């Protein structure tokens, strides 16, 4: 009996001590949390003002693409253009957006820093041949020489040989496709910016093209009207809920494929949402 009583007394004081201990810890936790809320957490109005720029800059570095949301690839041909390409890049940077630039090798040699900046912004650089000569009809030797010149120009500018090529005038035949290791990419929405050089017409050709999810829009780097159209279209596309992605990202995230060599991914492919391939 005596032993039991003693045991009970010990147990009671142990429980009391444990309860006190827990209470002290809880009190400490709550006061710590309250302190954190008062001092460490920035106010929401501060976030949207001063903190906004920094947060936005970090977002650009680590762009997140949601494969379940609509996406479209803006592409610009015939650059880099010393006068207008930097303005297109400014527009993309200001909107935290990216595009794919199909560049002419001889201009890449002239303005390597433009493509270097494009890559830094997360844009993709594709080839558009070295001299912008139509590929069909060229000899095997001429094609090989064009490839060599392009490889040198792109390696020098961006330390990489582009994975994608867009043939000049979108023109290619099977025998030429077979001579390239690169993926041939055309477009599905032609803004005709180069033809009319008319800002409204270029903008409307995109706005009236219907559902743009999975589509590739063709524009050009070397016209002032194309820059002005891009300045309207980039924010408009984002407002419509489209993610602006590179062509390679479009293949990966929208179509879920690794594109194959010796095919031409062009109008039929994109307009059929990947159902039709033309080789
Ligand atoms: Zn071109």
Image (cartoon, rainbow, N blue to C red):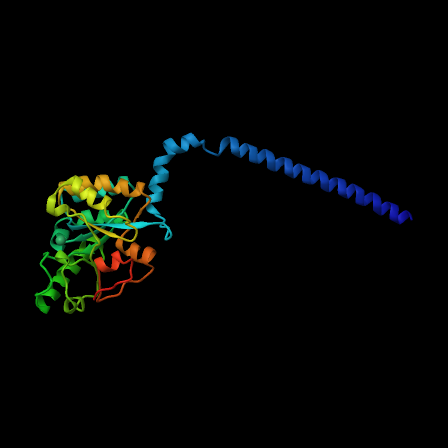
**Quadrant of the drawing holding the C terminus:** bottom left
Percent x, y for residue 259?
28, 62
Q: Nearer the viewer, residue 40 or 248?
A: 248
Q: Nearer the viewer, residue 148 or 174?
A: 174
x%, y% of residue 195? 11, 47
Image x and y of residue 33, in percent:
56, 36
Examine the rendered structure and indicate whether residue 187 appears above or below residue 92. below
Q: Position of residue 129 (x, y in %)?
A: 14, 58
Residue farthest along the right direction in this orientation: 1
Q: 119 or 95: which is nearer to us? A: 95
Which of the 4 quarters of the picture holds residue 199? top left
Q: Based on the displayed image, in which of its 4 quarters is residue 205 positioned?
A: top left
Q: Is residue 161 visible?
A: no
- At x 33%, y 41%, the residue is 57
In-image side of 260 versus 64 (left or right): left
Camera-side residue: 8 or 168? 168
- Looking at the rendered structure, the number of numbered marks drawn on it comes to 0
Residue 115 in view (yes/no): yes
In the rendered view, does 119 fall on the left or right side of 9? left
């Amino acid at each position: 009996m005596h032993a039991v009583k003693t045991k009970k007394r010990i147990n009671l004081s142990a429980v009391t001590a444990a309860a006190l201990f827990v209470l002290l810890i809880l009190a400490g936790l709550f006061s710590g949390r309250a302190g954190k809320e008062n001092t460490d957490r920035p106010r929401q109005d501060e976030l949207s003002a001063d903190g906004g720029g920094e947060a936005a800059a970090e977002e650009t570095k680590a762009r997140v693409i949601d494969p379940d949301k609509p996406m479209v690839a803006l592409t610009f041909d015939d650059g880099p253009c010393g006068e207008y390409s930097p303005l297109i890049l400014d527009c993309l940077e200001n909107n935290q957006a990216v595009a794919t630039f199909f560049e002419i090798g001889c201009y890449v040699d002239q303005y390597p820093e433009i493509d270097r900046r494009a890559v830094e912004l997360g844009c993709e650089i594709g080839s558009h041949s070295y001299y912008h000569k139509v590929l069909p009809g060229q000899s095997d030797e001429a094609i090989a020489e064009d490839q060599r010149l392009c490889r040198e120009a792109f390696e020098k500018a961006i330390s990489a040989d582009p994975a994608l090529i867009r043939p000049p005038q979108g023109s290619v035949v099977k025998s030429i496709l077979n001579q390239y290791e690169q993926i041939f990419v055309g477009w599905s929405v032609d803004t005709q910016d180069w033809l009319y050089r008319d800002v409204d017409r270029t903008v409307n050709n995109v706005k009236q093209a219907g559902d743009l999810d999975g589509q590739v829009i063709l524009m050009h780097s070397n016209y002032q009207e194309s820059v002005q159209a891009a300045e309207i279209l980039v924010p408009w596309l984002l407002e419509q809920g489209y993610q602006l992605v590179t062509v390679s990202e479009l293949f990966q995230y929208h179509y879920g494929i690794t594109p194959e060599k010796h095919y031409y991914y062009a109008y039929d492919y994109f307009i059929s949402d990947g159902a039709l391939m033309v080789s």
